Amino acid sequence: MRAFNFSPGPAALPEAVLEQARAEMLDYQGRGLSVMEMSHRSAEFMAIAETAEADLRALLDIGDDHHVLFLHGGASMQFAAVPMNLCAAGDVVDYIHTGSWGTKAIAEARRLANVHIAASSEAENFTRVPSPTEWRLTAGAAYCHITANETIGGVQFHDFPATGAPLVADMSSDLLSRPLDMGRFGLVYAGAQKNLGPAGLGVVVVRKDLVGRARTQTPRVLDYAIQAEHGSMFNTPPTFPWYIAGLVFRWAREQGGVLAMQRAVERKAAKLYTAIDESDFYHSPVRIADRSLMNVPFTLAEPRLDGAFLAGAEARRILNIRGHRSVGGMRASLYNAVSEKAVDALVAYMGDFEAERG
């Protein structure tokens, strides 16, 4: 029996995807070899790549005005690639600071551009998203960057305000969980290991008019124009993660697309937040309006019970709910591949534990 996996990443994958990958592991479509063993220039892999891009475009309604790139390095590489491609060394770039991953993106950007923190919730321990009325955007900024969902703190943008500069969003943990108006974004990027596939792959959706601006010292492998020109194959791409991501995209389409994904995650999150809010034993630190539907951090009434709670969860095959070391407590990630059955099991366990220890 497979465990109930609430890992924040690398995260649960759809069982149907894992089953198909297992069936094709040694012999992909009668070719007598694995996808991991075939040339990225082969007709078979080119078909995998083209199908994956077409499915992602269909899921997110991405038009011809955006490139879709499948790259190495996950989201962290894009922390550097974004400023290298979208601004000159002295340009001002705006960042909205909402948590740990925003902190990392800002630290990298400061090595490459003039970063202005246009709004921050750091003083409140990143328990909310700053209201757009608090944003102090820079006239003439090269871009405005947000982290759409903070996996550690559990805060999420539920709307995307208009910005004068191109809006850049790290959507590593909530891409494919809801419909998006891609016309509102200059660039969206995501590490795959949350909702899209296994670790090692980064997906970049970038407006074509923003491509071709890379500073001269940008490494060619990080230059969006070069990668777009070569179909994301300027160098050997992460072929197996790309293949698995393609299977995830097809699975998501078969489930009903991002609207179905959104409805499912809303149901799952409602169950878990209700269990937290109706209890005096569990607590969510995040402002209700800004709570993440993807990552739900919560604490117990007595931190001394954390170890017993985790041990009891593991005994029930409820895994990977320990909170991040920087914040403690618990965290359950509700990505698309996490079933409602898993959430029901967690909620039932929480009730039992409170009855025994509360």
Image (cartoon, grey):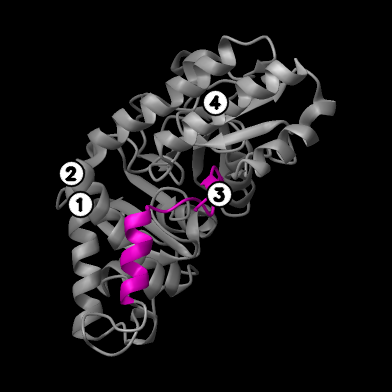
Determine the image quadrant of residue 341: top left
In this rendering, the label closer to the viewer, 3 or 4:
4
Asked whether the beta carbons under mark 3 and mark 4 sit within 8 Å of each other, the answer is no
Other-residue count near label 1 (Cα within 10 Å), few / some / many at <14 / 14–19 / ≥20: some
Say what amino acid the circle numbered 1 marks.
Arg
Q: Which residue is mark 1?
A: 57
Q: Earlier in the sequence, mark 4 or mark 1?
A: 1
Query: What is the distance, in whole Å, between disc 2 and disc 1 at their CAs?
Result: 5 Å
Q: Position of residue 82 (x, y in %)?
A: 45, 53
Dot placed on the residue nearer the N-terminal end, 2 or 3: 2
Residue 61, numbered circle: 2
As displayed, is residue 357 above or below residue 202?
Answer: above
Task: Give the magenta range.
Answer: 1-24
> How much space separates mark 4 and mark 2, taking CA atoms?
35 Å
In this picture, residue 217 sits left or right of residue 179: right
Question: Label 1 near label 2: C-beta < 8 Å?
Answer: yes
User: In the image, which is nearer the foreground, mark 3 or mark 1?
Assistant: 1
Q: Amino acid at mark 3?
A: Ala
- Decide: is 6 above or below 328: below
What label does residue 347 carry, if any?
4
| Residue 135 visible in the snapshot | no
Spot occupied by residue 156 in the image (x, y as percentages of width and height): 48, 28
Please tell me whether residue 216 is drawn above or below residue 29 in the rendered image: above
**Contact, mark 2 vs mark 3 (Cβ under 8 Å):** no
Q: Give x and y (percent) for residue 138.
A: 47, 30
Disc assigned to residue 113: 3
Q: Badge 2: few (under 14), some or many (20 or more) residues near its Cα, within 10 Å? A: some
Disc number for residue 348: none
Q: Nearer the viewer, residue 120 or 193?
A: 193
